[in-house]
């Protein structure tokens, strides 16, 4: 979640706003709400396309390293596998599904601080 949140927050929104074509009546509240939702979606797309791949690869490599514990004859190793497997699976779910869904809902409510 931390890596995806960092990528989300460091996304440069000004470059996507500059790429938008000139719209008439851009100060209407509907247009501002649409622009805000587009910015959130662009930020999430950026975060998940770059950092999301790395997080997914990390989860897959962890599963690959743990797979032999699932077939170990000792019960302690199998319990350890189940514990680590569920922890990594829950972490992937939180980072790739739950966090982006929360950001879509919460980000418009967060006051923006501008650097001056």
Image (cartoon, helix red, strand yellow):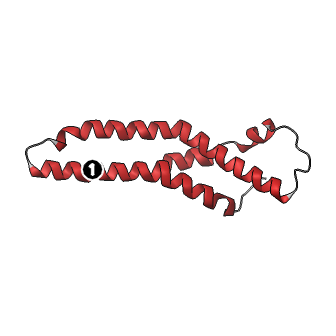
Question: Is residue 112 at least partly visible in the picture?
Answer: yes
Residue 112 image-quadrant placement: bottom right
Q: In this view, does 16 lie above or below 90?
A: above
Residue 66 position (above or below residue 79): above
Question: Relative to 31, is 23 above or below?
Answer: above
Q: Residue at x 27, y 50 (%)?
A: 84
Horizontal and vertical percent position of residue 114: 75, 54
Q: Residue at x 57, y 44 (%)?
A: 7
The mark tally for this picture is 1
Q: Mark 1 points at which residue?
A: 84
Where residue 27 appears, as percent x and y from the top left, is 88, 54
Please, what secondary structure does the residue beneath circle 1 have? helix
Residue 104: x and y in percent read 61, 55
Instruction: Tell me the residue at 39%/51% (across/down).
Output: 91
Q: Residues within 10 Å of mark 1 (few under 14, many from 20)?
A: some
State the residue at coordinates (70%, 47%).
39
Residue 83 percent across, percent down from the top left: 25, 53
- Say left or right for 26 vs 83: right
| Residue 115 seen from this side | no
């Amino acid at each position: 979640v931390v890596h995806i949140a960092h990528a989300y927050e460091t996304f440069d929104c000004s470059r996507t706003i500059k790429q938008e074509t000139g719209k008439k009546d851009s100060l209407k509240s509907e247009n501002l709400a649409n622009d805000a939702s587009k910015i959130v979606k662009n930020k999430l797309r950026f975060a998940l396309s770059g950092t999301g791949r790395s997080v997914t690869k990390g989860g897959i490599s962890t599963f690959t390293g743990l797979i032999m514990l699932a077939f170990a004859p000792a019960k302690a190793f199998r319990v350890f596998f189940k514990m680590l497997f569920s922890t990594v699976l829950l972490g992937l779910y939180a980072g790739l599904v739950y966090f982006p869904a929360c950001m879509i809902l919460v980000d418009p409510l967060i006051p923006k601080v501008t650097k001056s």
